[in-house]
Image: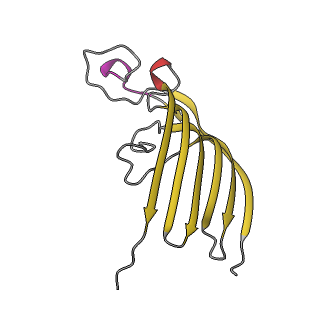
Amino acid sequence: MAEREIRVFGCASGEVTRNFARGVRNDGVNGRTELPLIADPSDEVLHEAYVAWSDRDSTGLARDQVMLGRQRLQYENERWIGPSEFRQNAQSFDAASVQVEPIDELVLRYAYVSRVNRVLGDNPNGHWSSDSHLIGAITVLLQP
């Protein structure tokens, strides 16, 4: 049987952004709706803060993982669920998530999301209350 390693860890990170084009664009918060929208308002936000448990195999890759707190969630190609990292303020989720690899080449994922911290930062439009259940499965099929 392969050697396994179990880790318990935490993380916290934040962002500070400043809007130097203040009166010449709509940042999604300033109310300047007659101007083009570029949703990068000035803000200081806590992007991630979570506690996690991880079970790693002998290669160092996480096989099973549980996370609780504010975290980045990325499902498949990030079209519907992702951090939108191309914005100055990335999106994060207040969630509980589980990822397991019950057999080689199959990863199952589940997350309960209570709030989405959107790219608009720490203001009324920047947070979206949620009661969402996310489910995903990833498999890798190797071709000869």
Number of numbered labels in the structure image: 0
The magenta stretch spans which residues? 19-26
Q: Give left or right: position of 24 versus 12.
A: left
Looking at the picture, does residue 90 appear above or below residue 143? above
**Which of the two residues, 105 or 18, is positioned nearer the viewer here?**
105
**In which quadrant is the N terminus drawn?**
bottom right
Determine whether, in the image, residue 42 is placed left or right of residue 39: right
Residue positioned 60% across, 68% down in the render: 61
**Rendered residue at 64%/48% (across/down):** 67
Main structural element of the magenta stretch: helix, strand or loop?
Answer: loop
On screen, residue 9 above or below 130: below
Q: How is the image coloured?
A: secondary structure
Please state which of residues 144 and 126 is positioned toward the viewer in this rendering.
144
In magenta segment, residue 5:
no
- 12 or 58, nearer to the observer: 58
Identify whether 123 is placed above or below 99. above
Q: Find the residue positioned furthest to the front.
A: 102
Residue 96 percent location from the top left of the image: 61, 42
Point out residue 134 in the picture as x, y percentages from the top left corner: 48, 43
Seen from the viewer's position, the closer of residues 143 and 103 is 103
Image location (x, y in percent) of residue 6 = 74, 64
Q: Which residue sits at x=52%, y=30%?
A: 131
Q: Quadrant of residue 15?
A: top right
Instruction: Name the residue rendered at 43%, 26% in the picture.
Output: 41
User: Which quarter of the rendered picture does the C terminus lie within?
Assistant: bottom left
Residue 58 appears at what percent x and percent y? 66, 76
Q: Does the magenta run of residues contain 25?
A: yes
